[in-house]
Amino acid sequence: MSDDQPVISVRGATAALGARPVLRGVDLTVHRGEVVALLGANGSGKSTAVRAVIGQVPLTGGTIELFGTERRRFRDWARVGYVPQRTTAAAGVPATIREVVSSGRLSRRGFGFATRADKAAVERAIALVGLADRAGDSVSALSGGQHQRVLIARALASEPELLIMDEPMAGVDLASQEVLATTLREQVAGGTTVLLVLHELGPLEPLIDRAVVLRDGCVVHDGPPPEGVGQHALPGHDHVHPHAAGEPLRTGLLT
């Protein structure tokens, strides 16, 4: 992959949920080392767009490429870390923080025995989100903000080149927001490319290189973040994606 090859390239993407069109010809490019925020009101297509990028929503038209490879042929998912919207469905998962974060390493090592490098990557990811002292605790005992930190650590465990996060700050307390902002800052400093779905920029605003605003499934802005969304949500935004509340805690990127 050449340095000028986009990490994500979306061209003319269309998608529907049932009979309802959600994406209407979306173009989106994210270059290596960029931090791009995907903004828009509720129903604008933000979450559908990122789910299409990782293959959870099929396109009805257009193309998506990851690291220069058509998404349908892309197999190197260890290069991609995905953080879904936080859900309450994980409250009953009988697993420790370390076990959940370790599952994020499967895309890199498969189902073989964990190596010393695997274990080190897991412990490093847990420490990055400030939960090293609770690694053996059950995820069912965590607060919402702490649970979100676990999801981010799980994505970081594979040491991804591309990090895709869907509403990482939604419903998260201020202390956890600051921890997550610091974690993301360290990843960006290390060269990680980031695509974020956000309803407001908040503490992440200094990290954002570019904002792409969707309205009714179309891109209406691609450039510097629009004024007024630094600390305030766009009108009509709903923090929870309509499909997120019932989505179970995933133990792998796409399973």
Image: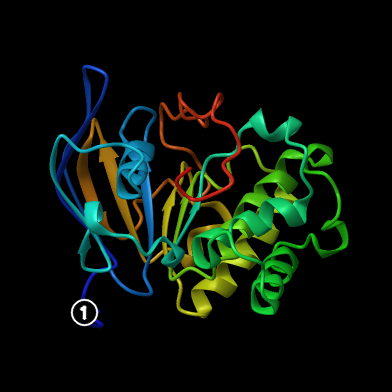
Query: 84 and 115: which one is in front?
Result: 115
Q: Nearer the viewer, residue 130 or 56?
A: 56
Instruction: Identify which residue, 39 or 162, lies in the foreground.
Output: 162
Residue pictured at 30% horizontal, 43% vertical: 52
**In the image, what residue occupies the spot 41% across and 60% down?**
77
Which residue lies at the image location 34% right of the left edge and 51% below the top edge?
226
The residue drawn where x is 36% and y is 56% is 225
Is 156 on the left or on the right of 92, as rendered? left
The residue that mark 1 highlights is 4
Q: Residue furthest bottom?
A: 3
Q: Position of residue 39 (x, y in %)?
A: 37, 44
Determine the residue located farthest toward the front in the rendered image: 112
Please rate how many residues cluster around mark 1, counting C-alpha atoms within 10 Å: few if below 14, some from 14 to 19, many from 20.
Answer: few
Instruction: Name the spot of residue 92 as percent of width and height, x first.
Output: 75, 30
Above/below status of 224 relative to 176: below
**Percent position of residue 103, x then y:** 62, 54
